[in-house]
Image (tube, grey):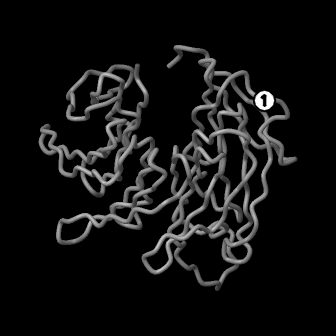
Amino acid sequence: MIHDAQLDYYGRRLATCSSDRSIKVFSVEGDSHHQIATLTGHEGPVWQVAWAHPKFGNLLASCSYDAKVFIWREVNGQWTRVKDHTTHTASVNSISWAPHEYGLVLAAASSDGKISVLTYQEDGTWDVNAFNAHSIGANAVSWAPSVVPGSLIQVSGGSTLPASKRFASGGCDNVVKIWREDSGVWREEAALEGHSDWVRDVAWAPSIGLPRNYLASSSQDKTVLIWTQDSAGGGNGPWAKKAIKSDAFADVVWRVSWSIAGNVLAVSSGDNKVTLWKEGVDGEFVQIADVPEGSN
């Protein structure tokens, strides 16, 4: 079973991972693709893969049930494992690279209840900062964009301050949490309660210049919630929640993912359906497409 598939920044490489403990890398050209590498080393099902920004080279991260995170580098067609992250003591369920403006930084969420943040140093080493995040276990992690909300409609003459490092996480405590870095320490900024079962995924929407943060969360409770935060007050204001639809989905909602423009949300549920949603002018989300199973 394939658990994840991710295109690189340019859409020319596709990485997949599966229950057979392997990662496969494909070259993509138009409608055709061919396999160019198989990466092995994990000792359990591989849950997720994530490409780093190309400014850092061809880097791919993977996480597995074996409690490990591997970082792979490709040079001249040859893949090597350049980092084994073995801090966690249980399945690592989710990984996410930070916006490239922050450097080479990777966050990982684990069933041991901890989140770890790996930061590449100039001397070639990795700094690891792990902390308790969710009781029972952490299932998902997603970084906030580096662009300050509202920066594209800022009044002329105003100063643009870089956004603080923030990310969202979801866990088996049914809670979505917002984390902010403060002098090298990750602190819980907000705990968002609204789900009645495990939070399976979180996705922070890319910034499109509007003065608001958007965060989507999906859950074992068969719902998707949209959390919004106005940028007034430096992004420290309260979060408001709204269900994406009035009734529940037919099955567990496993994954949510925003479009690059940040205005369309893809929702993947346990009944093998993918639906696309968009916010209307009235602030309500409406379904705009139902992606047929097996479609390209």
Left or right side of 216 for 54? left
The three-letter amino acid code for the residue at tag 1 is Ala
Q: Is residue 147 above or below residue 3?
A: below
114, 140: nearer the viewer: 114
How many discs mark residues in the rendered view?
1
Q: Is residue 14 left or right of residue 224?
A: left
Query: Up-down: is 169 above or below 295?
Result: below
Residue beneath the point at 67% across and 68% down: 150
113 or 76: nearer the viewer: 113
Name the residue tied to disc 1: 248
Task: Return the x and y of residue 290 as percentages of the image width and height.
Answer: 68, 22
Who's the residue at 68% across and 39% down the image?
197
Residue shown at the point (63%, 40%) measured from the top left? 198
| x, y percent for residue 213 | 67, 60
Above or below, 139 against 209 in this view is above
- Locate residue 118: give its quadrant: bottom left
Residue 191 screen position, x and y as percent: 67, 60
Residue 67 quadrant = top left
